[in-house]
Amino acid sequence: MALNPAQLKRIEETIQADIERGDYDGVNVIIAQHGEIALQGTYGFSERATERPSKQDDIYRVLSLSKAFTNALAYRALGEGKLALSTRVVEIVPEFLGTDPFRMMRKDKINLWNLLTHTSGMPATPNPGMPIQDCVKLPEIATAIGTVDVIHEPGTQVNYSPAINHALIGEMVRRAYGYDSFQDMARELIFEPLGMKDTNFGLPKENEDRAVPIKAYVPDTGFLRPEDIEGLNEVITEEAELPWVGATTTVDDVFKFVEMLRRKGEVNGEQLIGKAIIEQATTLQTGDMMNDLYTMVNSEMGWAAPKGNIGLGVILSGTGPVPNFFGPFTSPNAFGNNGAGSTLFWVDPDNQVSFVFLSAGVMDEAKNVERFQRISTMISAAIV
């Protein structure tokens, strides 16, 4: 198999047309097969308002794509016997129960599997028990989550969690390993072994000049308002430990991470994460359960409700015509992660194709799904 150069050129032209139309400001893209890059492109603007051009070494605040890095920390903890999928949150983070006995119900049932599969029953809120503007250090955030009620019986339905689940995952892993700092743990266990030299949780001061500002092109009536999204420019600071939304990185670093997943945990001839862990993580865990949050997105567009299609922290392509980030022509086993209206990676293991897309300008989520479905379909059509 190979990737058709003429189709790759069409993909470039499509991206450039999207940017010229004002759908988003700019993007860094990598498309590869068997680890060999077939297309790497830098297009448009890092910041349209100042006409700052995109550069390959731009550093993006990748929003919920950050969850993929937190997932990887959990995978290491599982493979190294630090945690189990059945480990309950309260065993590691007892303050998760809170102090009000009338608000503790069902919290003692929630385990690591529930958090990774978004079946914890916790609410789909972007604020983990405290205003996002106050979120800095992870232990304090985990304590604040103790004030948040469970709203569904754990394990009974998928409700994608923008914040709470991965905040708890990050704190469980940190305590299991005994690190003082979540940032240090992520750097030592994931980023340094992969050579991801420009990736951090938080934005180091030396990287600020290369950072792409978050600009939101979303309606005021949406799930998140423009000011909610753009406010993350000030929230994601050098000190911020936000396992669900706070990573900063480059397209080349994300590609290194994605290739580790494609190779089932292998890096430079060594197994960073156990092969069995990656295989299970990229296998459907949520059965036929629907995704409550994305059902609202699809309903607004008149689309059918989507299944959860979640593995252990990753999203799976699945089958059928319901619009999704991967399009209907990747293999059902394709998996990846995305960040609100702007970032995406996926791996199609059947065709050994990898895709990384980091863009400036946060789109409305339904339009974002349409964009990624179109581009993902074009990538699938490039396989010959």
Image (cartoon, helix red, strand yellow):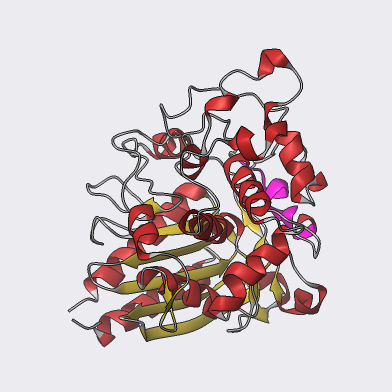
Above or below, 236 relative to 92: below
51 or 146: nearer the viewer: 146
Above or below, 317 relative to 238: above
Tell me which segment is drawn in magenta: 224-234
**Quadrant of residue 108 within the rendered picture:** top right
361 or 237: nearer the viewer: 237
Quarter holding the C terminus is bottom left
Above or below, 196 relative to 73: below
Residue sticking out furthest to the front: 81
> Residue 73: image x %, image y %?
56, 59
- Is residue 356 rendered to the left or right of residue 171? left
329 or 258: nearer the viewer: 258
Residue sticking out furthest to the top: 102
- Is residue 275 rendered to the left or right of residue 98? left
Residue beneath the point at 39% across and 84% down:
39
Would you say residue 12 is visible in this rendering? yes
> Residue 213: image x %, image y %?
71, 66
Q: Main secondary structure of the magenta part?
A: helix
Q: Is residue 226 magenta?
A: yes
